[in-house]
Image (tube, helix red, strand yellow):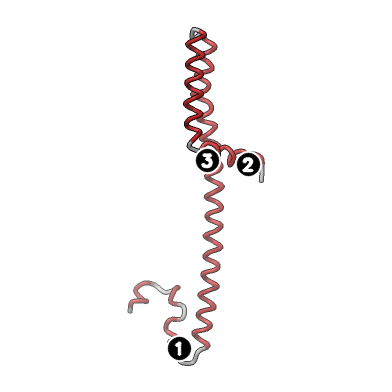
Amino acid sequence: MNHLLRLSLWIEQKCSHPASALWATLLLLLWAAGGFALGWNDGWIAVGTFLISVPPYMLMFFLMVAEARAHQESKQREAIAEQRDRALHAKIDSLILAIDKADNRLVGIERREEVERIG
C-alpha cells in the first residue's frame, strides 16, 4: 500500500470521528482568542486565511482518494460474489440434470429473460 493511500485512510479515519468537529471548533476559538490578544495584525489574519482555505482542500483530496479505494474494493467484492453465484448455479444445474425425475425446465433459469420465466 503506498504512502498516499495510507495517509488518506488515516486522515479519513481521524476526520470522520465525532471528536474532530470539537477539535476544529477548539482550534478556531484559540485562533480567535490569540488574534484578539495580539490585536489582529496582518500575520495573524494570514494564518487564519490559510487555516480556513488550504486544509479543507487537502482534506477533500485525501477523502476522495480513500473513497476511490473503497469503491474499487467494493467492485472487486461484487465480482467475486458474482463468480460464486455462477459456480453455485452451475452446481445446482448439474444436480438437477443428474436426477432422473427432476424438472429440467428449471436448469439455467437464472440466465433466461423475465418473460421467458413467467411463461
Residue 62: x and y in percent read 56, 37
Q: CA distance from mark 2 to mark 1?
A: 54 Å
Q: Secondary structure at mark 2?
A: helix
Q: Residues within 10 Å of mark 1 (few under 14, many from 20)?
A: few
Question: Which label belongs to residue 64?
Answer: 3
Say left or right for 47 vs 105: right
Q: Which structural element holds mark 1?
A: loop
Residue drawn 46% across the image and 81% down it: 107
The answer for how far apart the CA atoms under marks 2 and 3 are is 13 Å
Q: Earlier in the sequence, mark 2 or mark 3?
A: 2
Vertical arrangement, residue 27 with respect to residue 60, above or below: above
Q: Where residue 6 is drawn, which disc sits there?
A: 2
Residue drawn at x 54%, y 36% as measured from the top left: 61
Q: Which residue is mark 1?
A: 102
Q: Is residue 100 above or below residue 56?
A: below
Residue 13 % position (x, y): 55, 40
Residue extending farthest to the right is 2
Amino acid type, label 1: Ala
| First-in-chain label (2 vs 1) | 2
The front one of 48 and 37 is 37
Query: Residue 51: x and y, percent?
Result: 52, 23
Total labels: the figure holds: 3
Distance CA(mark 3)–CA(mark 1): 52 Å
At horizontal 51% and vertical 79% (from top left) the residue drawn is 92
